[in-house]
Amino acid sequence: MHINRSVLVLTAPALAASLLLNACAPAQSSGPALDPASFVPAPGEVFAGIDDVGDMGLWMITKELKNATWLGEQYKGRTLREPVNVILIDKFAATPEQATARMLDGMNKAGYGPKGGHSTGYSGYLNGRLYAQYPQGNGEAFSDGHWWQSNNHGRMFGPVKTSGGYVFIGAVSGEDFRLLPKPGHSFNNFMIARENFADQLTANTVFKKKGYIDLKGKIDTATETTADHDGCAVILVARD
């Protein structure tokens, strides 16, 4: 699958930009935020005992403390569940602040700096609690393209101190920009985005791809799916 990265050319740029910015404003949830401390994962939605990581939730979580479903996007008539598919392990960071700074530096060097035009307010579950997303700016995600382009984008959650160092988990996906039936973003893939994200980090940052872990996170039922997701997360470990 090839992601078209061509920039949309409009005959009335100022008017179109205003319209599209409004259309693409963060809208992943409309209800009130709940207390993250009250979150209890459902049975089968945590993968336990990952070496150097611990117990990890399988899905991104919305501010209503529900499993994220890719903005309500339907994929072949089924609800599209949004998986966690990235693990970063930093054995060299000395503090949570240093781990966060190294992760953010890695995102920028990999071409996935924070960009606006995305939904926000997500969390990830790791070792007994929820961690709010990075980037923290309103309407931002780590992305390799602007909101008016097809792009790969994601959020990271953590850091969490474990026996292996400081850990972030993340959810990465690919999306396309559309004008019809209304301006916005449509789902493209999970797998291509995950691999591009891992490859760019490996090539340009201290985080190098170590391998994969099968989290058994693939869904394929009559009503719900994870599309092309293979159920696995890629693991990247800092080398220095």
Image: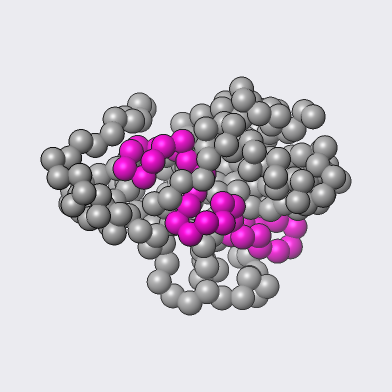
Q: Position of residue 82 (x, y in %)?
A: 48, 51
| Coloration mode | one colour
Residue at (20%, 36%) from the top-left corner? 9
Q: As rendered, which of 5 and 69 lies closer to the eye?
A: 5
Q: Nearer the viewer, residue 76 or 175?
A: 175
Seen in the image, is 210 located left or right of residue 85?
right
Q: Is residue 11 left or right of residue 166?
A: left
**Looking at the image, which residue sits at the far front?**
14
Please provide percent x and percent y for residue 88.
69, 40
Q: Position of residue 112 (x, y in %)?
A: 52, 37
Q: Which residue occupies the foreground of this view, 114 or 171?
A: 114
Q: Is residue 129 magenta?
A: yes
Q: Which residues are magenta?
A: 123-152
Q: Quadrant of residue 145?
A: top left
Image location of residue 231, percent across then percent down: 56, 41
Q: Residue at x 56, y 51 (%)?
A: 135
Give the image quarter of residue 71: bottom left
Residue 80 visible in image: no
Q: From where the camera sits, is residue 173 visible?
A: yes
User: Which residue is found at the position 35% from the left and 37% from the top?
Assistant: 150
Instruction: Identify the residue shown where x is 39% and y is 41%.
Output: 146
Residue 127 versus residue 106 in the image, above or below: below
| Residue 208, magenta (yes or no) | no
Q: How many marks?
A: 0
Q: Is residue 57 left or right of residue 89?
A: left
Q: Quadrant of the C terminus?
A: top right
Identify the image quadrant of the N terminus.
Answer: top left
Residue at the extreme top of the image, as rendered: 203
